[in-house]
Amino acid sequence: MSEPQPEPLGDGRWRLAAERGLGSVTERASVVVRGQADEPPSAEHARLAGARAWLSVSQRLLDTGAVEDALTGARSGIAELGDAYAGDDVDDDTELKALAAEDELANGDRSVATTLLLRVLESRAQLYAEAHPGIEA
């Protein structure tokens, strides 16, 4: 899926946007990054926008009872954000939450597992934003 080009907002601020969808649900999310006025920021931060879009998609799907699609979306968002989402000095417990979600899946409670994975995705997206001082929103 191709992403829109960074949008200049002025004062060295740029918006990176992403749109993600699954089934009939599509969401768009963006990230505002401080950079140079005449040079767009690294496209790597677009993965945060993609992860946020997946989070919104998955939450909407879960709210409508589409648990399997919500689970797929949560996993997609976690994969898109990747493993390099937090600074080295951060005490990150999201891997424990992800393991708890896998336990719930093994026990057959897909709704609880999906909710846990959505918390993992939300926490990791927040950690990513905190680890990159140029990210404003």
Image (cartoon, rainbow, N blue to C red):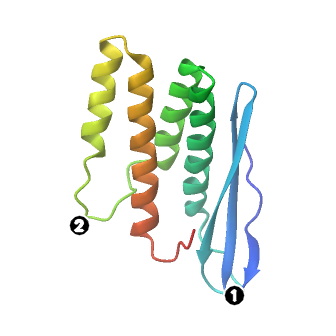
Which x, y percent locates residue 137? 57, 68
Q: Residue 121 lies in what quarter of the image? A: top left
Residue 105, compared with residue 4, is above or below; it is above
Instruction: Please give the residue where the numbered disc 1 appears in the rendered image.
Output: 37
Q: Residues within 10 Å of mark 2 (few under 14, many from 20)?
A: few
Q: In the depicted view, which residue is nearer to us: 112 or 30? A: 112
- Identify the image quadrant of the N terminus: top right
Label 1, residues with CA under 10 Å away: few <14, some 14-19, many ≥20: some
Q: Distance of mark 1 from mark 2, alpha carbons?
A: 30 Å
- Residue type at numbered disc 2: Asp
Q: Residue at x 70, y 58 (%)?
A: 17
Mark carried by residue 61:
none
Give the residue number, with chain letter if any, for mark 2: 89
Answer above or below: position of 3 versus 90.
Answer: above
The x and y percentages for residue 57 are 63, 37
At a point 25% along the width and 62% down the height, the residue shown is 90
Give percent across and percent down for residue 19. 71, 46
Q: Residue at x 55, y 48 (%)?
A: 51
Report the side of 56 relative to 10 (left or right).
Answer: left
- Residue type at tag 1: Ala
> Who is closer to the viewer here, 94 or 5?
94
